[in-house]
Image (tube, helix red, strand yellow):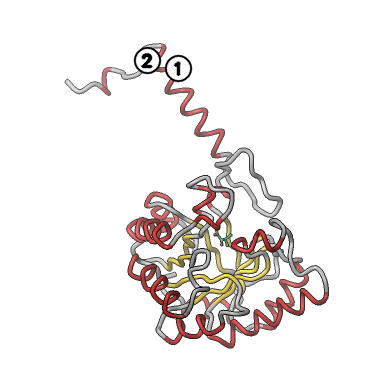
Amino acid sequence: MNSILEFGQSRRSGRPITVVTAYDVLQARAAAESQVDAILVGDSVAMVVHGHPSTINATVEMMCLHTAAVRRGAPAMVVVADMPFMSFRTGREAAARAAGALMQAGATAVKVEGVSGHEDVVSHLVGSGIPVMGHLGLTPQSVHQLGGHHVQGRTPAAAQRLLEDARSLERLGAFACVLECVPAELAGRVTGELSIPTIGIGAGPDTGGQVLVITDLLGMDATFRPRFARRYLEGHGVVVSALNAFAQDVRGRRFPAAEEVIA
Ligand code: KIV
C-alpha cells in the first residue's frame, strides 16, 4: 500500500490487510519486495533489537532512527511508526513534536496506544494531518499496570470498555486500530462495529487484517514463541548453521577459495 486510504478501501472490500514490523533497511527492503501491505516500526524494537525487557525503553530518538532506516528501504510503502512510552502523555504540544519528528523521519502515520485520557492528542494529530492508528487490548507500554503481557477484555466490563475505546478512536479520526491479545469473539465484535479496519495480533481470525513482529515470523529468537505468532522460517537455526559452516570452512582452510581471493 502506498496510502493509508487503502486501509479504508480494504475494510470496505473485505480484503484482509497484512502488516509486518521492520526496524532496519534490509527488513524494509524485503517487506517492500513482498506482498505485505504495510510496515510498522513498532516500539517492540526496544525489545527485539535492543534487548530491553519491555517497550518502555523505546524513545522518540530511537523510533526516529529506525523509522528513517525503514523509509530508506521502503521508499513508497505505508510506514507506521509507534509513538513511544509517555511521548503522547505529557501534553498536546510534546505529543505533536514527537509525532512531527517521526513524520519527518519518514513515517506515513503514527500509532498510539490506548485512547482514554489522550483523546485530545489523537484529535490534534489527526487535525494536523497526521494519520493515527490506534492500539487497544494488550497495550505493552502499560505492562506494569496490566501485571504482564496478558490477554485483555476477558470480563464483560473490560470488553465493554474496549468496545467504547474503539468507537472513540474511530470518532476521533483514527484510520485503523490494532487489537492485541484479545479473545477472538471480542475482536470480531469490535471489528463488526467499526467502519475503520482492525489489525489483529493474537486476536483471532475475524479482524480486518493481521500484524506480526518480523522476528517472530522469521523465528529469529529461539527462546520466544508466542502461541499466536506463526513461524514462517526457523531463522535462528538457519543463522547458527550458516555461522558454523563459516567457522568450519575457515578452520578447514576451505574459505577463502581461489575465486574469493583478490589478486
Ligand atoms: O511494537 C509492536 O511491534 C507492535 C505490534 C505488536 C502491533 O505494536
Residue type of the residue flagged with mark 2: Arg
With respect to residue 93, does 32 lie above or below?
above
Q: Mark 2: which secondary structure?
A: loop
In percent of the image, x 61 and y 76: which residue is there? 14
Residue at which label 1 appears: 248
Assess disc 1: are there few (<14), some (14-19) or many (≥20) residues with their C-alpha within 10 Å of its C-alpha.
few
Q: Nearer the viewer, residue 79 or 171?
A: 171
Q: Nearer the viewer, residue 11 or 51?
A: 51
Image coordinates for residue 64, horizontal then vertical, percent? 38, 61
Q: Is residue 94 left or right of residue 86?
A: left
Q: Nearer the viewer, mark 1 or mark 2?
A: 1
**Residue furthest top as drawn:** 252
Q: Are marks 1 and 2 in contact (CB under 8 Å)?
A: yes
Q: Mark 1: which secondary structure?
A: helix
Residue at which label 2 appears: 254
Q: Quadrant of the C terminus?
A: top left
Q: Is residue 216 left or right of residue 253?
A: right
